[in-house]
Image (cartoon, rainbow, N blue to C red):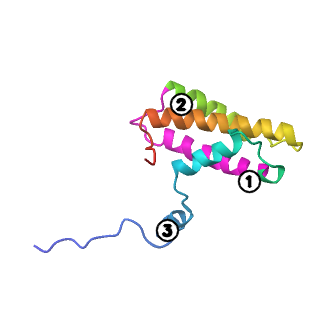
Amino acid sequence: MPAERAQPPLEGDALRAVVAKLRAWDPLVVDAIFDDLDRVLGDQTPPADQIDELSECLRGTLMQLVNIAVADPKFPPTEGMLREIARACGLRSEELPGDYWPAVGHLRRLATVTSDLLELMLIAQYIKDSE
């Protein structure tokens, strides 16, 4: 009896959609996150011309962390992670203030919740440090 002919799991548009998502994928680089956190929370206040860029970067990082934390129903996020995810969602929905110092404050809150969620996820081994 001959073997059944193998059927690919995806064809046409579905396969193109997967390839597009793979091409657009931005891997999580923990060292880069720490660099961004240092730019926001370090000794020097970020310059005004970097506020928008840093805000978008931290918002994207938070989205990645949240998605990783809730991705596997077999390993639901811890209570601490859920608290930080709620904080993250609240901050992500807020507009970046137009004035410099309020924008810096908002940016620092984004960085703090990013740092807190990242730390909890590293401890729980949802992600690995680059070391």
- State the CA–CA distance, disc 3 to disc 2: 31 Å
Residue 22: x and y in percent read 50, 64
Instruction: Report the number of discs.
Output: 3
Q: Which residue is mark 1?
A: 53
- The kind of residue tagged 3 is Val
Residue 73 among those drawn in magenta: yes
- Give me the disc on residue 19: 3
Q: Residue at x 47, y 43 (%)?
A: 71
Q: What is the magenta segment's predominant secondary structure?
A: helix
Picture quadrant where residue 74 is located: top left
Residue nearer the viewer, 15 or 120: 120
Residue 39: x and y in percent read 68, 46
Residue 42 among those drawn in magenta: no
Q: Is residue 60 above or below residue 108?
A: below
- State the CA–CA distance, disc 3 to disc 1: 27 Å
- 101 left or right of 76 in image: right
Tag 2 or tag 3, which sits nearer the N-term? 3
Tag 2 or tag 1, which sits nearer the N-term? 1
Picture quadrant where residue 73 is located: top left
Kindly state the secondary structure of the residue where label 3 is placed. Answer: helix
- The kind of residue tagged 1 is Glu
- Specify start and end residues of the magenta stretch as a single range: 51-78
Q: Residue at x 64, y 34 (%)?
A: 113
Residue nearer the viewer, 51 or 35: 35
Number of other residues with Cα within 10 Å of mark 3, as a class: few under 14, some 14 to 19, many 20 or more: few
Q: Which residue is mark 2?
A: 81
- Give me the disc on residue 15: none
Q: Nearer the viewer, mark 3 or mark 2?
A: 2
